[in-house]
Amino acid sequence: MRKYLCAFAFVILVGGSFGSSAFADDTLVRFKGGIGVLPVSNVVVVTDTTTDPDTVTVTVTRNTVRGVNPAGQIWVIRELKADVKVDGRIKVDGRIKVDGRGLLLGGGNNIGTTNNQSVRARLFCSGVAHDSDLVPLAANGDFQINDILTPTPPDPCDSPTLLIVSGGDSWFAAGIPKLD
C-alpha cells in the first residue's frame, strides 16, 4: 500500500509541474486604468521687461507621447483594461484585448460625445509601435479591441506604453501599466 501511495504522490507532483507550466500566464503586458488626453503639456509666458514691457512671448508645448501628437481637444476615459498576450510555446503573437469605457470629448461644443471617432490600440515596446485595427466608438464612448498587434511585439516588451489612437493618428487616452 505504501508503495502505491509513494507512486501516486510522485505522479501528482510530476503531473502538477507539467500542468502548471501548460497553464502558465502568457501575459506580455497588462494595463488597468486610463488617462484621457490633455492636448497641452506646458505653457510658458515671458515678458521682456528690459526693452518693451508690452512684448509677451507665449510658448505652448503639445502633449506629444512617443512621437504621437495629442488630439486637438481634451478627452476623458472612465475605465480601461488591456492585456497583451504571447504564447511562448509557439511564438510571440501579440494578441491584444482592450476594454474601454466612456472615452468621450471633455471640452468644446461636442463635449460628452465621441464625435463619431474610431480608435486603435498602439503599444510601444522600447519606443517601437505595434498597432491593432481600428474599431468604432459606441455613442457612450465604449469600445472593445480583440486583435493581433502588427508588427509582432518583442518578448520582453521593455518600457511598455499603451496609447488609444484615432484613425487620424492622434492619441486620445493612455493605459496605466499594471506592475504585478
Image: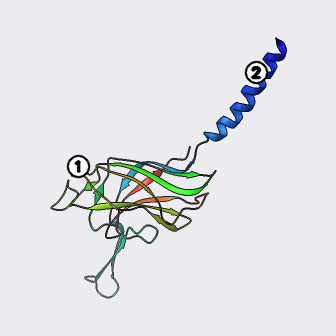
Query: Which quadrant: the C terminus?
Result: top right
Q: Mark 1, residues whose alpha carbon is within 10 Å: few (<14), some, or many (≥20)?
A: few
Q: Secondary structure at mark 1?
A: loop
1 and 2 marks in contact (CB < 8 Å): no
Q: Residue at x 26, y 64 (%)?
A: 73
- Which mark is in front, 1 or 2? 2
Query: In this rendering, would 142 be left or right of 8?
Result: left
Callout 2, which amino acid? Phe
Question: What coloring was used for the rendering?
Answer: rainbow
Using the rendered view, name the quadrant where residue 19 is placed: top right
Looking at the picture, does residue 15 appear above or below residue 41?
above
For the residues labelled 1 and 2, the Cα–Cα distance comes to 56 Å
Q: Position of residue 146 (x, y in %)?
A: 41, 52
Q: Residue at x 69, y 31 (%)?
A: 16
**Which residue was labeled with disc 1?**
140
Query: In this rendering, would 54 be left or right of 61?
Result: left
Q: Position of residue 24 (x, y in %)?
A: 61, 41
Query: In this rendering, would 1 be left or right of 103?
Result: right
Callout 1, which amino acid? Asn
- On residue 8, which mark appears? 2
Looking at the picture, does residue 178 appear above or below residue 2?
below
Q: Position of residue 178 (x, y in %)?
A: 51, 47
Q: Residue at x 25, y 54 (%)?
A: 104
Nearer to me, 70 or 103: 103
As drawn, which residue projects farthest toward the right? 3
